[in-house]
Image (cartoon, helix red, strand yellow):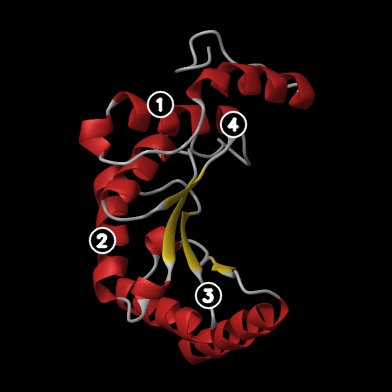
Amino acid sequence: MTRQEVIEKVREMVSYARSLCPDIEFSPEDAGRSDPQFLYQVLAEAIKAGATTLNIPDTVGYTTPDEYAKLIAGIIQNTPGIEKCIVSTHCHNDLGLATANTLAGLQAGARQAEVSVNGIGERAGNAALEEVVMAIHTRPHFYNMTTGIDTTQIARVSKLVSNYTGISVQPNKAIVG
């Protein structure tokens, strides 16, 4: 697609989704490797069309924490209408940086983290809920945010997910191992 075709498709699809429900999450595939100026433009069009959450995926787990934080900060600083939306992180763990990238994105201003129990997900997985939550819980003055998650239930949920998926947790896995 040309850039103009992308913008038109974003307008069309987000508008259509908005006609069906009031809470629309828009995800620009592979945002971590996108041209930032074009990304800001696409996100602004998604907002105008009715997006309420902007999910910023590091689709192939390529970015470093510093790069991801700059991406989130740039989006917040340069996207018209951003104050109408929640910015969300969505980090993959291909280079083992999903949790670090998620935390960096939150520090840069994202207010939603898309995570998974035990870090399960395609390829190398996604940011691990237990790692993100416990980092924030253990270092509240550093992160200056809370999650509202009952941390006493994390190990139990991890075991439940492991039992149902058949995916064992390695014994030395952070938090739940």
Q: Which of marks 3 and 4 is nearer the N terminus?
A: 3
Kind of residue at disc 2: Ala
In this view, 143 is above or below 55 = above
Where residue 136 appears, as percent x and y from the top left, is 35, 32
The CA span between labels 2 and 4 is: 27 Å
Residue labelled with disc 4: 117
| Helix, strand or loop at mark 2 | helix
Mark 4: which amino acid? Answer: Val
Q: Answer with left or right where residue 141 lies relative to residue 87.
A: left
Camera sees residue 1: no
The tag earlier along the polypeptide, 4 or 1, is 4
Looking at the image, can residue 150 be seen?
yes
Q: How many marks?
A: 4
Q: Give the CA separation, mark 1 to mark 3.
A: 30 Å
**In the rendered structure, which amino acid carries the disc numbered 3?**
Ala
Residues under numbered marks 4 and 1 in contact, where contact means CB atoms less than 8 Å apart: no
Q: What element carries label 3?
A: loop
Judge whether 27 appears above or below 112 on screen.
Answer: below
Q: Nearest to the eye among marks 4 and 1: give it.
A: 1
Q: Do the residues labelled 2 and 4 touch (CB within 8 Å)?
A: no
Separation of disc 1 and disc 2 at Cα?
23 Å
* Labels 3 and 2: the sequence-earlier one: 3
- Check disc 3 and report the residue beneath it: 51
